[in-house]
């Protein structure tokens, strides 16, 4: 049998074919880098958006926490005011009650004096 091996140094390609292959490979590489660069940009934008969303959520959480504390302080202030008003009202009621008791005693004393005076006139 005859030796069918081909010497690679003797193979030649037309210049147009070499240019075509080189341009296909070059455009493929350029497309890959362009696409990868676009993907990197998109990923960077997504990361930035996620960080912004996280920051906004943290800000909203902080605002809600401050509002909760403020509401709690307002409620505590109202409780103190209500307690003070209740004590003041109770003290006023006690004072009126004592005054009424004193007046009742004075009325009794006057009634007794009037009764003695009436009895003494007869």
Image: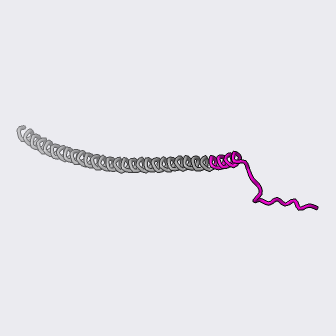
Foreground residue among 92 and 86: 86
Q: Residue at x 58, y 47 (%)?
A: 35
For this view, does 43 lie left or right of residue 20? left
Q: Position of residue 8 (x, y in %)?
A: 77, 59
Please tell me whether residue 41 is drawn above or below residue 1 in the rendered image.
above
Answer whether residue 105 is magenta in the image.
no
Answer whether residue 17 is magenta in the image.
yes
Q: Residue at x 84, y 60 (%)?
A: 5
- Magenta span: 1-28
For this view, does 95 lie left or right of residue 39? left
For this view, does 11 lie left or right of residue 79? right
Foreground residue among 103 and 73: 73
Foreground residue among 9 and 63: 9
Q: Main secondary structure of the magenta part?
A: helix
Q: Position of residue 100 (x, y in %)?
A: 18, 43
Query: Which colour scheme appears in the figure?
Result: one colour
Q: Report how many numbered discs are placed on residues in the image.
A: 0
Residue found farthest to the left: 121
Q: Residue at x 47, y 50 (%)?
A: 51
Residue found farthest to the right: 1
Q: Quadrant of the N terminus?
A: bottom right
Q: Position of residue 30 (x, y in %)?
A: 59, 48
Q: Quadrant of the C terminus?
A: top left
State the image quarter where residue 107 is shown.
top left
């Amino acid at each position: 049998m005859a030796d069918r091996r081909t010497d690679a140094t003797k193979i030649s390609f037309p210049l147009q074919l070499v240019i075509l292959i080189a341009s296909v490979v070059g455009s493929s590489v350029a497309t890959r880098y362009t696409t990868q660069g676009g993907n990197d940009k998109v990923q960077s934008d997504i990361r930035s958006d996620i960080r912004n969303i996280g920051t906004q959520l943290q800000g909203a959480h902080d605002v809600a926490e401050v509002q909760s504390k403020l509401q709690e302080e307002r409620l505590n202030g109202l409780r103190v005011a209500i307690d003070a008003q209740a004590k003041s009202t109770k003290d006023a009621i006690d004072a009126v009650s004592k005054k009424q008791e004193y007046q009742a005693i004075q009325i009794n004393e006057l009634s007794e004096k009037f009764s003695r005076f009436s009895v003494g006139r007869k």
